[in-house]
Image (cartoon, helix red, strand yellow):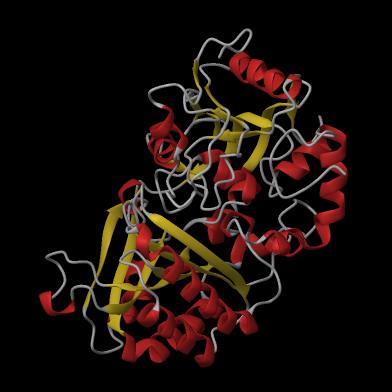
Amino acid sequence: MEISGFCGAVIDPTHEEFESARFGWNHMIDRKPALIAVCESVDDVVAAVSHASHASMKAAARCGAHSVSGASLPESGLVIDLSGLKEISVDPKAQIARVGGGVLLGELDAATQAHGLAVTAGIEPETGVGGLTLGGGIGFLCRKLGLTIDNLIGAQVVLADGTIVEANEEVHADLFWALRGGGGQFGIVTRFDFRVHPVGPDIIVAHSYYPLAKAREVMRFVREFMHSATDDVTLVPAFMKVPAVDIFPPDWHGLPCLAVIACHVGEQTAAKAELQPLLELGDLIFGFIDEMPYLEFQKTFAGASPEGGRFYWKSIFVDDLSDDLVDVMAEGISSLPGKYTLVFMETLGGAVSRVGVDETAFPNRHARYNLGLSAGWLDSAQDKQAVSAARAWFEKLKQFSDGTVYLNYLDRDEAARKRAGFGPNYDRLCEVKKKYDPNNLFSGVLSAD
């Protein structure tokens, strides 16, 4: 099948590469789009959008294909693959990075760190910049620099009618507001403009791994530490299974533990002293504090959830680390199946909390933590058991929720939580959707109806 005016590859169900091309990172998502349009330019994106519109076909952008819910894979729709839009331009003097819609987080980090600069990015280098950004963008630097969207100063967008617009605080300001946390359902973003900041190139990092029996004590430390922490430091506690690698004692391989990963971008001598207590809570399985290139630190969780695995997510925002919550988290990593299952917390506050609820579409600026479950396994025969166990565990977790949810962590069966994802900004987002995509061309959790 051909797309008029399109220069890239068009992959339909008869194409020999269709089966491999249609799958993203999460192989539980087994949908069959009508077409996959692999774009080489912005003009290709325009042609693809026009084709979808004329064919009354749902369309979705795909960059890293890392959506757990398969948001970039519409059934019988058009996948607009942006992987060819890789241009990155960094102006170190102005501290601005202009980033193509097909760039991955690892590529963004490498390009900005070449100039000693960075913007908040997520923890998986193979994630697309677009998906992360449009949902908000939580990462190790968010307490220091704010969410990824808080550093977005402009975007180029292909609208449903095929026009190309610039969106920023002065032009299409309502669209620019919606793009910052409202998801990729208003148009196809072909370029992101970020304010970038001096970071590194070396930072201070800490890893500490403790037995589950120490979970309450360690998480009490995390709670007290983060209540008084400066914006320079972020801790990420993760209930996980000990990797079978040489740095860990062999008798711990595969057993559940509590890890606390720390990132500190402040003065290095003081940073090491501030993080030292992480290694002194007793019964440490393994740990260290050291100087490390920020670019390497960003790869800490690379491979923790490998492409081609089968994944199911749940998440909540929480305000406190009570002992009861810690017990439920520890129970989760002990009982939930899956070699790649993680229960983790992303610490917020700092710069994230100094942005108003209505300044961007991202509504939750006050929660201290984002708690996520990433259940991960390889064998499709485990699907029913693993999903059922995750849902049952989540029922125990819900009592600790502040009632909101991170859009980027919504899974495919959570449409009922979409209002919680947008909070008081939901109605305003629906109005923007109605204005820019009145016929619901672009897949998403909002509707113009």
Query: Is the residue 162 above or below the residue 309 in the image?
Result: above
Query: Is the residue 70 above or below the residue 8 in the image?
Result: below
Please tell me which residue is depicted at 46% across the width and 81% down the height of the picture: 329
Which quadrant, please, contains the N terminus? top right
Given the current orientation, which residue lies at the most extreme top position?
A: 5
Decide if residue 100 is in sight here. Answer: yes
Query: Is the residue 260 above or below the residue 63 in the image?
Result: below
Please tell me which residue is depicted at 52% across the width and 92% down the height of the picture: 324
Q: Where is residue 438 in the image (x, y as percent from the top left)?
A: 85, 34
Q: In which quarter of the image is residue 6?
A: top right
Please tell me which residue is depicted at 66% across the width and 40% down the height of the picture: 184
Which quadrant, please, contains the C terminus? top right
Total tally of numbered discs in the picture: 0
Please tell me which residue is depicted at 71% across the width and 32% down the height of the picture: 187
Q: Position of residue 294 (x, y in %)?
A: 36, 50
Compared across the picture, whether 103 is left or right of 149 comes to left
Compared across the picture, whether 247 is left or right of 184 comes to left
Compared across the picture, whether 412 is left or right of 363 comes to left
Q: Position of residue 291 (x, y in %)?
A: 27, 58
Q: Quadrant of residue 77?
A: top right
Decide if residue 236 is in sight here. Answer: no
Q: Quadrant of residue 78?
A: top right
Q: Position of residue 46 (x, y in %)?
A: 67, 18
**Of the pair 55 and 319, the residue shown nearer to us:** 55
Compared across the picture, whether 78 is left or right of 335 comes to right
Query: Is the residue 16 above or below the residue 281 in the image?
Result: above
